[in-house]
Image (cartoon, helix red, strand yellow):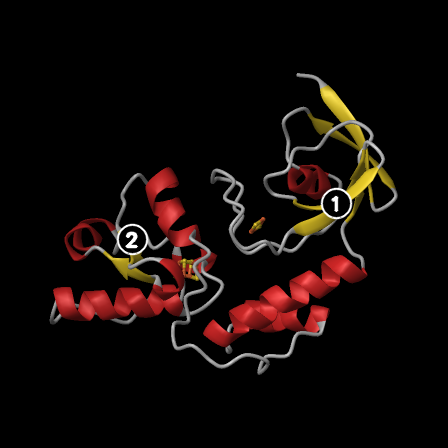
Amino acid sequence: MSEVLLQIDGKEVRATEGASILEAACAADVFIPTLCHHEKLEPHGGCRLCMVEVEEHGRSKLVVSCIYPAANDQVVTTRSEQVDRIRKMILELLLAHAPDSETLLELGREYGADRNRFDKEASFCINCGLCVRYCAEVKKADAVGFLDRGTRRDISFIPEIAARECWQCKECFPLCPTSALQAAYVLVSSLAFPGARHQAPSEC
Ligand code: SF4
Ligand code: FES
């Protein structure tokens, strides 16, 4: 397979043709923050936190690095005033949904995000889709899905499938950047399997 040669934060980086800028950066030990990316899943491009600046063909633009292909002669900047400002805004919006998420709070500190900038919304799920996509793409189980659409989307386990698949699996739990996933599981298991052990085990 052929390779492309680009520059990321001043570092010469070789990447396999077809790799995303995020993959190229990871392989070169350059950190780009992500919330909806997982190496086992198809690229999603949902959270936009991985946005970077790219200069190519004499023009500079912002791109979503997890879905934007690495190419010859690109000059990538993973942090700049503009990039940091966008990440800060994204984090402030997400913190309105999940104000106690350690993952978001840590990222928020890095980008100077104000946890209280926007009115709180009681969802806690930031719709990253990691749990839904992991269950569908990796486990082929479809035990977890979204309810409703748009800003009111929330996560839910499908009780009949969850009863069969989830107790032995729970591989999605550590993927969740908030507490929403385990809360949804505890809720569905308490409604669907009365008398069962509802507390999600901590070793997951
Ligand atoms: S429950 Fe967690 S992993 Fe699933 S979509 Fe919501 S925030 Fe993402
Ligand atoms: S990690 Fe790229 S959009 Fe979420």
The residue sitting at 39% across, 46% down in the picture is: 133
Quarter of the displayed picture in which ligand 1 can be seen: bottom left
Under circle 2, the secondary element is strand
Q: Amino acid at mark 1?
A: Lys
For ligand 1, tell me if the residue under mark 2 lies within 8 Å.
yes
| Badge 1 element | strand
- Circle on res. 61: 1
In the image, residue 57 above or below residue 9: above
User: Mark 2 = which residue?
Assistant: 144
Task: Indicate the position of residue 35 as horizontal and vertical percent values.
Answer: 55, 56
Q: Kindly report the distance in space between the C-alpha atoms of the residues bearing marks 1 and 2.
A: 36 Å
**Furthest-left residue in view?**
194
Q: Earlier in the sequence, mark 1 or mark 2?
A: 1
Residue plotted at (70% across, 38% down): 27
Can residue 98 be seen here? The reply is no
Q: Amino acid at mark 2?
A: Val
Work out whether 1 lies above or below 21. Answer: above
Label 1 or label 2, whichever lies nearer to me, is: 1
Q: Position of residue 138 (x, y in %)?
A: 38, 39
In this view, the residue in front, 39 or 115, is: 115
Q: Position of residue 18 (x, y in %)?
A: 63, 26
The furthest residue to the front: 59
Q: Nearer the viewer, residue 35 or 58?
A: 58
Q: Position of residue 53 (x, y in %)?
A: 76, 48
Q: Is residue 14 above or below residue 165?
A: above
Q: Quadrant of residue 203?
A: bottom left
